Image (cartoon, rainbow, N blue to C red):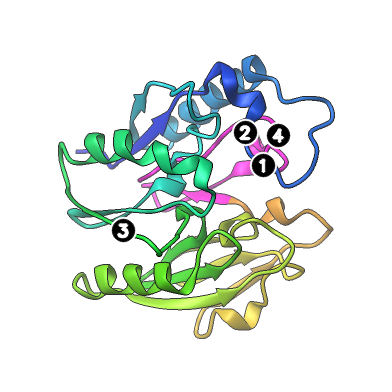
Amino acid sequence: MAPWALLRGVPDSFAACVTRRPADPPLDAALARRQHRAYRACLEEGGFATRLLPADEAHPDCAFIEDTAVLLGDGALVTRPGHPSRRGEVAGVAAALGESLRVEEMAAPATLDGGDVLRVGRRLFVGESERTNPVGREALARFAAHRGYEVVPVPVRGVLHLKSAATALDDSTVLVFPGAVSPAAFPGLRVVAVAGDDPEAANAVRLPTGASWWRSTCRRAPRRGAPRDSTH
C-alpha cells in the first residue's frame, strides 16, 4: 500500500490568508489552485496516494494543512496553531485523520505549527519560532517519546517556520539555508547548505522512493502562489 498524503483545497478566501509581508500583487486563489493541483500531481508521481479535503472558506489558510497535525506511526497529534485565526482548521483535519489513526489533541496554552517539525530518523527537530512555544514543544515531546522519537529544539531567524529553511533529504542529510538556521543545530547529520538569499531554496519533499523532489519545482514565495503543505 502506498504511503499517503492528506491535502486540503484552496478556498476563494485564500487572498485573505495570514502574511508576514504585504502581498504585491494580491494573492490569486485561481492561480494557487492550479499550482496546488500541480503539487498534488508531483506527490502522486513520486509514489504518494493523496486525499484532498474540501476547502474551508472560513479559514483562508486551510490549504496549509501541514501545520494542523504531526503524524508518527499509527498516531496523530492535532496541534494548536500559533495564529489564533487558524485554530478552527483543526477539527476537520482531526476528523479525517481519526478514520485511520489514533488522534491526540494539544491543549492550551500550548501552540505548535507542523511547519516547525522536521523529522530526520528518530529525531524531531522543532523550530523555536513565533508560532511554536515551549509548552507546545513539550506536548510534542510527550507524544513522540511513546513512539521512540526525541524532540530537539532549533532556533530560527527571519523565517516563519523551521521548514521554511530546512528539510530532510534522507535520514542522515538535511538541506539548510544557513542565514535562517545554523547548520550546527543538526549534530551527527550531513548538512547541505544552499547558497543565495532565498530560504525556500532549502525546501524539498522526500518521496517514498527515497528520492527528493525540490519544492522549487512548484514553489511559491512565503504566502504567495501555491500552497504546498501536506500531512504525510
Instruction: Say whether residue 35 is left or right of residue 212.
Output: right
Q: Secondary structure at mark 2?
A: loop
Q: Earlier in the sequence, mark 1 or mark 2?
A: 2
Read off the residue under disc 2.
17
In three-dimensional space, the C-alpha distance between marks 1 and 4, rounded to whole angstroms, equals: 13 Å
Q: Nearer the viewer, mark 3 or mark 4?
A: 3
- Which residue is more in the foreground, 101 or 201? 101
Residue kind at label 1, given as amino acid type: Ser
Q: Earlier in the sequence, mark 2 or mark 3?
A: 2
In three-dimensional space, the C-alpha distance between marks 3 and 4, rounded to whole angstroms, equals: 29 Å
Read off the residue under disc 1.
216
Relative vertical location of residue 182 with respect to residue 57 in this rendering, above or below? below
Q: Nearer the viewer, mark 1 or mark 2?
A: 2
Tell me, yes or no, whether the highlighted magenta stretch contains residue 207: yes
Residue 9: x, y in percent? 46, 23
- Which residue is more in the foreground, 26 or 212? 26
In three-dimensional space, the C-alpha distance between marks 1 and 3, rounded to whole angstroms, equals: 32 Å
Label 1 environment density (alpha carbons within 10 Å; few <14, some 14–19, many ≥20): few
Q: Earlier in the sequence, mark 3 or mark 4?
A: 3
Label 2 environment density (alpha carbons within 10 Å; few <14, some 14–19, many ≥20): some
Instruction: Say whether residue 70 is left or right of residue 162.
Output: left
- Which residue is more in the foreground, 128 or 168? 128
